Amino acid sequence: QSLGPFLVPPCPAGAEQCGRPQRGRGRPARRPLTMFRWLGGDQRRTKDSKAFVDVTEALQKLYRENLFPLETEHDFHHFYSPALTDADFSARPMVLLIGQYSAGKSTFIRHLLGRDYPGLRIGPEPTTDKFVAVVNGTSDQIIPGNALVVDKSMPFTQLSHFGNAFLSRFECARLSSPCLEGVTLIDTPGVLAGEKQRIKRGYEFETIVRWFADRVDMILMLFDVAKLDISDEFRRVILAVKGNDHKIHIILNKADRCTTPQLMRVYGAMMWNLGKVIDTPEVSRVYIGSFWDEPLVNDDMRRLFESEENDLYTALAQLPRSAAVRKLNDLIKRARLAKVHAYLIDHLKKKMPSLMGKEKVKKELIANLTEVYKEIAKEKGVALGDFPDPTMMREKLLPLDFKSFKKIDKRKMDELEHMLSVEVPKLLQMIPMETESMDLAELSQVGAQASPFAVMKVGGNTETTVYQNQWLCAPNVEEYRADFMACGPNAQGRVTGQKAKSKLIESKLPSNVLHKIWTLADIDRDGLLTLYEFSLAMHFIKMRLDGHDLPAALPQNMLVPEDED
């Protein structure tokens, strides 16, 4: 094949010989499966199949048998979060919306659903005064919190621990919606300022937000372009979701109210404020747009808004496919925390004296908790990053009797290690197959069929690929005849690579892109370009300059015409 004028062939002396891959290197050797053993029913294989029918069942089984006993043994649920239920693993992916009042949380949900959910009220004042779980149902229905937490098919049973003060401000809104068949949306009250937020709610707002943040698949944090100040109350809410930073997606809403220069200053101010609260070296992902159905006040940034909205809607639509990975990741994180917690409780018990001086030793251990962490990490070979926040642990440990703590049960710890080292890798192998069989969440804002206004950004699709098919057609040779003749074709009507290169490099495209264009255009692989081949090259240059990806191979409808000599 012709390499063209844009690629130098590699030295043959440096090429490596291709050998047949050896067993044990690259991929494991396959074990032969005997037909008789299959028909006879291998008991070990049957047991494994039963344990791994699907990812959800496997997660439920692993938690009940390998992790929950260790949690119960060392009072894990008192220190961190309540026990998980089967519904926590089988529930649809959940999206939590948080933000200050009038940031557009309820309007965003209405925008996704295309209608009001039961009990919805929208206004510029603080209107949403409850936590509302918006779920799919056959008809419109509102379920009060006390009734909702006794429904074991829903992942909210553990909220009963927060009492009537919270349950009276919690409800479930059921309605029929294609969007809710894929995800569940959690609407929250707007964060207020002053003692109205801290005292008059009657329940621990930050604790409830943390409970949801640990269980949801995505956290949408909404900001209004006109209300960028982060109050002390909102700061505590943001800190409450710490540890779930990978779930947070920040939305700068109502951006059409600003001109382009104003929007730049607003974005900078918001990132400055967030930088003082979200203490991470990475810049948080911010989606800029106006997430409602109203006409745009300033549409100068329409192209940016479309791109940002497509990114967010694609992330929402793909939640059902990523939910299994998220739940497995959360289970592993919980298991690692339970492991270091067990080591910590066992260590504190061993340090207590048998007779006198217990209170003094207890105070010393609590005061030097960070040094205790380092000692355990060195002794047990665990990472310091797995240990809980020492300030929180000091508060929890202070009223407890260390002598009542239980020693580590080696059998239970071995079962946990078996889960992490053997069972979890099995699950990871199952997830790709199960993910492929899942449907995306159905959003009316973006669908499988792209349009000039919205596109699902999967499989390499972008806003520009919507128009790619318009370029994959035969070029008009008359449009490029003058340029072809200016290159000086030979007597056979062909341009050499050297002459064609001087014209093609005027595009300022990199040589590796021009090489790909040459490979597509030089149909007969003779290192020369006919008029039609030259037209193809110029056509692909225009296509790439317009932002479209080049095809991997020349489409059939773009092959040389029959009348081409």
Image: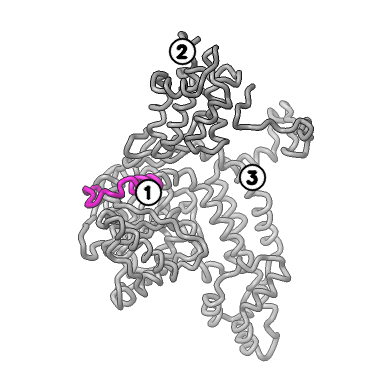
Q: Residues within 10 Å of mark 2 (few under 14, many from 20)?
A: few
Determine whether, in the image, residue 210 is placed left or right of residue 426: left
Q: Amino acid at mark 1?
A: Glu
Which x, y percent locates residue 194?
30, 77
Which x, y percent locates residue 63?
57, 55
Q: Quadrant of residue 340?
A: bottom right
Instruction: Look at the numbered discs 1 and 3 and tell me whether their residues touch, using CB distance below 8 Å.
Output: no
Q: Residues within 10 Å of mark 3 (few under 14, many from 20)?
A: some
Which x, y percent locates residue 53?
57, 40
Q: Which residue is mark 2?
A: 561
Q: Which residue is mark 1?
A: 308
In this rendering, does residue 148 appear at all?
Answer: no
Q: Amino acid at mark 2?
A: Pro
Q: Quadrant of residue 187?
A: bottom left
Instruction: Look at the numbered discs 2 and 3 and tell me whether their residues touch, using CB distance below 8 Å.
Output: no
Q: Residues within 10 Å of mark 1 (few under 14, many from 20)?
A: some
Q: Amino acid at mark 3?
A: Lys
Q: Which residue is mark 3?
A: 426
Check residue 10 in the rendering and tell me which mark sits there, or answer none: none
**Eyeballing the image, is 164 above or below 38?**
below
Residue nearest the observer in this picture, 513 or 313? 513
Q: Nearer the viewer, mark 2 or mark 1?
A: 2
Q: Nearer the viewer, mark 1 or mark 3?
A: 1
Magenta stretch: includes residue 527: no
Q: What's the image's color scheme?
A: one colour
Q: CA distance from mark 2 to mark 1?
A: 42 Å
**Eyeballing the image, is 533 above or below 301?**
above
The structure residue drawn at horizontal position 61% and vertical position 66%, both measured from the top left corner, is 385
Residue nearest the observer in this picture, 496 or 94? 496
Q: Earlier in the sequence, mark 2 or mark 1?
A: 1
